[in-house]
Amino acid sequence: MENLIVDEDIGTVYHLAALLSATGEKNPGLCQEVNIGGMVNVLELARIYHLRLFAPSSIAVFGPDCPPLAPQQTPLNPTTMYGITKVAGELMADYYHAVHGVDVRGIRYPGLISWKAPPGGGTTDYAVEIFHDAIETGTYSCFVSAETRLPMMYMEDAIRATLELMDAPADSLGPARSGYNLAGCSFSVGELATAIGERLEDFVCNFEPDERQEYADSWPDEVDDSAARQDWAWEARFGLEDLVDEMLANLTRMREVEV
């Protein structure tokens, strides 16, 4: 990576490599190595070569003691190794900014929903899997309960938020710069299944919670993103209904092309 930075005269790095929550629990040692080790490496490169750095965080930094509406400033007591590595990442980012002047910025991403990318081993994967199965088989077996409510975001909003944060003047950013809460839309699995069923009449969703239910239960229902809205004028565009329409339309089109 260092050679690439030097050879290509790179000035900004988006550090997106990580093991996510469910995968990280299956291999916590590798999760530490990839998530913390990778963060240290890229922060050092940012310090040496004066890079601007985007290093994402996650709603997984929150723990069971967090209120249903997570404030920007609240105790961070995660119960997963993934969450622990993301708290460590935020703290390291704060340190490198304060001590070395590194311009590092981050977002606590909610569950991200995209038709372009397959599920990646996270606890919020159900919100992507459900669309694939609804179109392909008409049924989905969900690994969390119908009442489970988590912050979610359509990928187009997440990408736009990332670019808007990186475009924001450095002096406009406040103490949340290493991990801004970011709200898209919050909904339960039951509400998501109902919205899909309104468009695919024969769709059936069953619920068989597994160990990932415990991870989901430790996270907030929604987040307060007033700091992001104040510091860099963040505003989400996609709500639940928009998201469902986009996912079904694009996945159906993609499936027709493949056939």
Image (cartoon, helix red, strand yellow):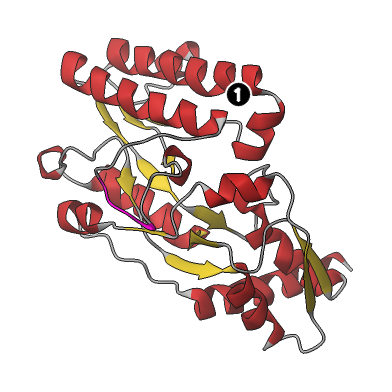
Dividing the picture into quarters, in which one does residue 133 lie?
A: bottom right
Residue visible at 30% across and 45% down in the picture:
180
Residue visible at 51% across and 58% down in the picture:
155
Can residue 125 be seen here? The reply is yes
| Residue 32 x %, y % | 56, 19
Q: Main secondary structure of the magenta part?
A: loop
Residue visible at 52% across and 24% down in the picture:
35
Can residue 15 be seen here? The reply is no
Image quadrant in which the C terminus is located: bottom right
Q: Nearer the viewer, residue 51 or 102?
A: 102
Residue visible at 73% across and 74% down in the picture:
253
Say which amino acid is labelled 1.
Cys
Give the residue number, with chain letter if any, for mark 1: 31
Indicate the secondary structure of the residue bearing disc 1.
helix
Q: Residue furthest front?
A: 65
13 in magenta: no
Range of residues picked out in magenta: 68-72
Figure check: 125 above or below 62: below
